[in-house]
Amino acid sequence: MRKLIATRFPDHPTVDSPEDVGALVRAVRTAAGLTLEEAALTVQVAKQTLQNLETGKGTVSLALVFKVLAGLGIRLRWQALEGASHATAQKGNSNAP
């Protein structure tokens, strides 16, 4: 039986890339004491899918990313970038004033 070593959580609270999502997923998984195999079984995805997500490969579908996040109890929050205008946020919305 191999010993699981917890991975450090990212030093920054932002998610700017697939690698950032992967680092967060790996940190949560290892903090929970789950191996890659155990976590994949728990969230019902293929081990390779979870491994691809954790290594930041951009080939994992968004639906599977959210399935993994939900399965591990991870919720994301959004924040508009500084300087983003209300008009930009409303672009494409036919109901915008």
Image (cartoon, grey):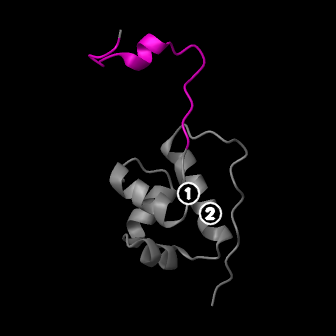
Q: Secondary structure at mark 2?
A: helix
**Magenta segment, which residues?**
77-96
- Going by the numbered disc 2, the residue's amino acid type is Val
Which quarter of the rendering shows the N terminus? Answer: bottom right
Residue pushed farthest top? 97
User: Looking at numbered disc 1 in the image, what kind of residue is underneath it?
Assistant: Ile
Instruction: List the residue tagged with mark 2.
Output: 28
Q: Which disc, if any, is residue 74?
A: 1
Where's the C terminus, which quadrant? Answer: top left
Asked whether the beta carbons under mark 1 and mark 2 sit within 8 Å of each other, the answer is: yes
Rendering quarter of residue 89 = top left
Q: Main secondary structure of the magenta part?
A: loop
Query: x, y percentage for residue 62?
Result: 36, 49
Can the viewer see residue 4 in this picture? yes
**Cα distance in 3D space between marks 1 and 2:** 8 Å
Q: Provide residue 38's location: percent of width, then percent of height.
A: 50, 79
Which one is nearer the viewer's eye here, 64 or 60? Answer: 64
For the residue carrying disc 2, how many other residues have a C-alpha within 10 Å: few (<14), some (14-19), or many (20+)?
A: many
